[in-house]
Image (spheres, rainbow, N blue to C red):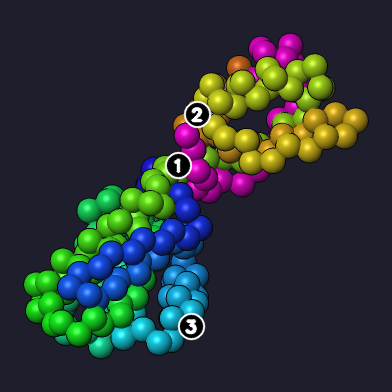
Amino acid sequence: MYFSVGAIESKAEISVKHSKFLAFCSRVENEEQAETFVKSIKKRYTDATHAPYAYLLGERADKSRASDDGEPSGTSGVPILESIKKAGLTYTAVVVVRYFGGIKLGTGGLARAYGDAATEAIRLAGKVSFEKCVLFRVLCDYSDLASATNQVFSFGGSVQTTEYGDAVTIIAAIPSDRKAGFLSGLADATSGKAIAEEGLEGYFEVK
């Protein structure tokens, strides 16, 4: 299991001695997405003084990058990265845009400001958990929909999509270590009428 942020993009703003810091946080799946997110923020705020950033990737949070974007070395990218680490997150990118207010903050002041702005954006984004799951395609009668859905939730899974036709098709993510229990529970709850087809394994958001 790992934790990431819940929002596609969150925004926080703080002011320190007339300098304005705009922080943006997003969940990203890989380095390419992270770099695209960084570039999109920089493109939106081309008039900003600096736009340092950091991102942390990997199921074990073992891949990272941090950039000071012209600020004194170690005063921005690293504090942003530390904010992500302190929140216990991975697959997370944060960009902090700065508009200089005319008063120098010093290296310590800069580090605190960038770290605080990143922390606030992370807080606003929310925190969600991702667990290794197996995707199941469950086909059931309308009369068994509630029972089948309850079994998904009972075993810590999540419903990804639900399609309605002659019967109901549920795409559900079930934690890998509970799939046997889910299949047994589904059979009992629907008197064996529901059909569950096992699919790919991967990491999915769970409650």
- Write the start and end of the magenta stretch as one range: 186-207
The quadrant of the picture occupied by the N terminus is top left
Q: Residue at position x 44%, y 70% from top?
A: 34
Kindly tell me whether residue 58 is visible in this rendering: no
Question: Circle 1 is placed at which residue position?
Answer: 131
Judge left or right: residue 167 versus residue 170. Answer: right
Kindly tell me whether residue 91 is visible in this rendering: yes
As measured in the structure, the alpha-carbon distance from the residue carrying label 2 to the one carrying label 3 is 41 Å
Q: Secondary structure at mark 1?
A: strand
As measured in the structure, the alpha-carbon distance from the residue carrying label 1 to the one carrying label 3 is 34 Å
Q: Which is more N-terminal, label 2 or label 1?
A: 1
Q: Amino acid at mark 3?
A: Lys
Judge left or right: residue 105 versus residue 37. Answer: left
Q: Amino acid at mark 1?
A: Glu
Disc 1 vs disc 2: Cβ atoms closer than 8 Å? yes
Question: Circle 3 is placed at which residue position?
Answer: 43
